[in-house]
């Protein structure tokens, strides 16, 4: 797309549309400063080009300039009220400004124009998650995953909804897929570990918590969860050692203290039985 727009500019160096298309291509390549320059040039040439206002709103969202992004999206909609992308950008700006009811209406407007627009589905899902409506998020993300089966954001939103609903079997399936796709995601591994624990699969949960600790090695809560997994497996000596490490990080952390006390007590009880 970038090469095509640059070729168009060689033929028509004053084409606002070609500059806007170039900006869009650069944005997709995450070359945001170049995209902004190209899009500004498009608006200098044609201040009424809806695509350029759409681009500007998207760039401002990426730059976290949400009040400006909202104004740009509204200008794009004045010029082309049928554009699902502009409605979704408006919704995203409103969502980040915590104007949730208005954001929901904007996402609904976007999806009314394009029911398969993945970005709008995902942003509406994030909004519904914030509103604590997990069943609706679940349904929406199943729809999103029909369009893009391996999309990490859709899988993450689905996993968060399933955890809120207590659907641990499905959560395990989703987080298994998510950790394969995003092996460096702490959130994905933590949810996967919690699904395993909820299903009583503590041996596998130990393996998952190891991955969590690789990503966040100084988190006392995760070390305590590892100690608890080991305790539940009857590996009391290891549980005591891991809980002791947690207490080095946070000496007053009561959950780690409790596991350490229980593990040490049972460790010595087992030792005494062997000596009888």
Image (cartoon, rainbow, N blue to C red):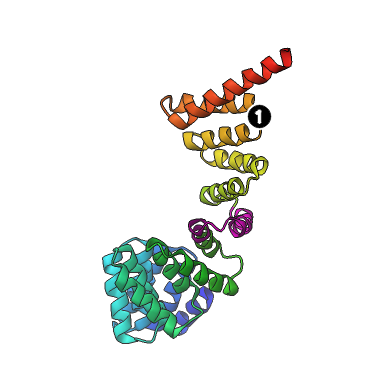
In front of the other: 214 or 231: 231
- Relative vertical location of residue 69 with respect to residue 187 in this rendering, above or below: below
Q: Quadrant of the C terminus?
A: top right
Q: Main secondary structure of the magenta part?
A: helix
274 with respect to 136 (left or right): right
In front of the other: 221 or 49: 221
Numbered disc 1: secondary structure: loop
Question: Is 178 colored magenta in this rendering?
Answer: yes
Q: Is residue 157 something that shows in the picture?
A: yes
To which quarter of the image does residue 41 belong?
bottom left
Residue 210: give x, y in percent of width and height: 60, 39
Density class for disc 1 (Cα within 10 Å; few <14, some 14-19, many ≥20) is some
Residue 148: give x, y in percent of width and height: 58, 71
The residue indicated by pointer 1 is 235
User: Residues in magenta?
Assistant: 160-182
Question: Is 258 colored magenta in this rendering?
Answer: no
Identify which residue is drawn at 31% across, 86% down: 79
Q: Residue furthest top?
A: 275
60 with respect to 246 (left or right): left
Identify which residue is drawn at 61% across, 53% down: 179
Q: Is residue 13 something that shows in the picture?
A: no
In front of the other: 28 or 36: 28
Identify which residue is drawn at 55% across, 26% down: 262
163 with respect to 238 (left or right): left
Residue 93: give x, y in percent of width and height: 33, 68
- Relative vertical location of residue 51 with respect to residue 178 in this rendering, above or below: below
Tag count in the figure? 1
Residue 227: give x, y in percent of width and height: 57, 32
To which quarter of the image does residue 209 belong?
top right
Identify which residue is drawn at 41% across, 26% down: 252
């Amino acid at each position: 797309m970038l090469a095509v727009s640059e070729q168009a500019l060689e033929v028509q160096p004053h084409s606002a549309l070609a500059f806007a298309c170039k900006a869009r291509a650069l944005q997709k390549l995450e070359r945001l400063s170049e995209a902004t320059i190209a899009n500004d040039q498009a608006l200098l040439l044609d201040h009424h080009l809806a695509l350029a206002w759409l681009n500007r709103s998207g760039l401002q969202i990426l730059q976290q300039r949400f009040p400006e992004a909202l104004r740009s999206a509204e200008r794009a909609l004045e010029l082309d009220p049928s554009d699902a992308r502009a409605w979704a950008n408006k919704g995203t700006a409103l969502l980040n400004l915590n104007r949730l009811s208005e954001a929901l209406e904007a996402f609904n407007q976007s999806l009314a124009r394009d029911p398969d627009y993945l970005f709008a589905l995902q942003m509406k899902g994030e909004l519904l998650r914030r509103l604590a409506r997990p069943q609706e998020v679940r349904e929406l993300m199943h729809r999103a995953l029909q369009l893009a089966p391996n999309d990490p954001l859709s899988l993450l939103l689905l996993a968060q909804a399933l955890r809120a609903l207590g659907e641990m079997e499905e959560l395990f399936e989703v987080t298994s897929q998510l950790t394969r796709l995003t092996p460096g995601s702490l959130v994905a591994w933590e949810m996967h570990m919690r699904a395993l624990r909820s299903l009583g699969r503590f041996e596998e949960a130990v393996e998952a918590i190891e991955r969590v600790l690789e990503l966040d090695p100084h988190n006392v809560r995760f070390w305590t969860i590892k100690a608890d997994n080991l305790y539940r497996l009857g590996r009391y000596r290891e549980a005591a050692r891991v809980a002791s490490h947690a207490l080095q990080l946070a000496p007053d952390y009561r959950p780690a203290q409790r596991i350490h006390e229980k593990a040490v007590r049972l460790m010595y009880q087992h030792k005494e039985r062997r000596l009888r």
